[in-house]
Amino acid sequence: MLKVLSGRVRRIPRWTRKSLAILSLFGAAAIVSVEYTYSFLWIFTRETSFVPDFLSSMVAGICLVPLIKNVRLIDRRLDVLSLIVFALFFYIFAAILTIPLGSGSGVVRYPMIASVVFAAASMIVKARYVALAAIAVTIFLSSVNLAHASDALGPFGFLLVTLLLVAKVLVVDLRSFVSPPPSGGSSTKIRQ
């Protein structure tokens, strides 16, 4: 399936693919840049924004470095379109990371940051069970933030994911995710 899709996408001229990806990423960037109002506990309303801050940008930068090298998020030929695509991917990735980190207007921001720091410190001093408990708390707090972000985004969350997938299909070579068939093996030829 991925090979067929990748082959059909590769038939589209490179400039057209990059331009369509940029349009898709601009739509996704617009979705994460808007401030949303949602209600919780049936009486409280809250405004939330997913605009990236320093913490989410730092984590996004650390996470995207291996992607640049391994998945070839940026073409070997550095042109203006490739840099625009990378900048938009970085912005959107940092904005999405504000959700589990609780940055910006997350529901549980400071307990989340404290649990991440505590989990990292526990792993450094090799307190295995304490680190596992801290990681469990971190995952729970991330899910709380994710549930509130899902409530805030509503149907725009689906549109955000769709636009990101379209941009990924247009930019990243999907054949790199498919493992080649095993070489050698037992090929039996009938001799006559």
Image (spheres, rainbow, N blue to C red):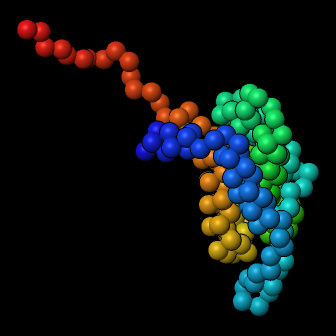
Residue name at image x 83 percent, y 70 percent: 34
Q: Quadrant of residue 142?
A: bottom right
Residue 131 seen by the camera: no
Q: Nearer the viewer, residue 80 or 155?
A: 80
- The x, y position of residue 185, in whole percent, is 30, 17
Q: Is residue 1 above or below residue 74?
A: below
Q: Quadrant of residue 28?
A: bottom right
For this orientation, the residue located farthest to the right is 54
In the image, 189: left or right of 118?
left
In the image, 60: left or right of 147?
right
Residue name at image x 63 percent, y 46 percent: 170
Q: Nearer the viewer, residue 113 or 35?
A: 35
Residue 187 seen by the camera: yes
Q: Nearer the viewer, residue 31 or 147?
A: 31
Q: Quadrant of the N terminus?
A: top left
- The x, y position of residue 137, in whole percent, is 70, 56
Q: Nearer the viewer, residue 90 or 1?
A: 1
For this orientation, the residue located farthest to the left is 192
Residue name at image x 84 percent, y 77 percent: 47
So how many labels did they put on this image?
0
Q: Is residue 65 above or below residue 129?
A: above
In the image, 67: left or right of 188?
right
Q: Quadrant of the C terminus?
A: top left
Residue name at image x 79 percent, y 42 percent: 81
- The x, y position of residue 51, in whole percent, is 86, 61
